[in-house]
Amino acid sequence: MKEFNFKKYVAELTDEELVGEVLSWDFSSKTTDEELLEAVKKNKISCFFANSLSIEQIEFLKNAIKENSKSPCLITADVERGPILYPELKAYHTSMMSLGAANDPSLAFEIGKYTARLCRSRGIGL
């Protein structure tokens, strides 16, 4: 496999592409698909913050970035309270206070591991 030369890659980016590479863009859930696509194309976006987006919007952005950006898509999110981003898991909600009250580090570890696996399965990098 060919070694990736990061310095060469960055040197070949335009200023606009570099900004799109290093910022994690945040969008409203009210942003339309057309607006998302326009933002990806105009700003050379390769990373976005997923918390306020629906699953459908996350998938749309992943595909738009795949088709329009030089870099792979990176998705970020705040998931410290568990995977509450997903409607199918509304019943699952972990408060940090309840984990602390349980006084069980192995339980906290397992919940964190579960959250990380779920996020990774959706393409979200923690």
Image (tube, grey):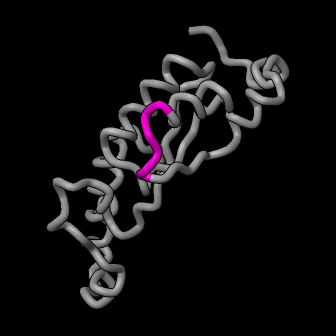
Residue 31 part of the magenta-drawn span: yes
Q: As drawn, is 93 to the left or to the right of 31?
A: left
Q: Looking at the picture, does residue 99 appear above or below residue 41?
A: below
Q: x, y percentage for residue 70?
A: 62, 19
- Rendered residue at 47%/45% (across/down): 31
Q: As drawn, is 82 to the left or to the right of 30?
A: left
- Rendered residue at 30%/47% (across/down): 117
- Rendered residue at 49%/21% (across/down): 66
Of residues 77 and 58, the one drawn nearer to the viewer in this rendering = 58
The quarter in which the N terminus is drawn is top right
**Quarter holding residue 81:** bottom left
**Quarter holding residue 47:** top right
Q: Looking at the picture, does residue 47 appear above or below residue 51?
A: above
Q: As drawn, is 73 to the left or to the right of 80?
A: right
- Magenta region, residue range: 29-34
**Quarter holding residue 102:** bottom left
Of residues 111 and 10, the one drawn nearer to the viewer in this rendering = 10
Judged from this view, the residue extending furthest toward the bottom is: 101
Residue 45 part of the magenta-drawn span: no
Q: x, y percentage for residue 40?
A: 58, 30
Count numbered badges in the picture: 0
State the predominant SS element of the stretch in magenta.
loop
Q: As drawn, is 88 to the left or to the right of 13?
A: left
Q: Looking at the picture, does residue 114 appear above or below residue 20?
A: below
Q: x, y percentage for residue 35?
A: 52, 36
Q: x, y percentage for residue 34?
A: 47, 31
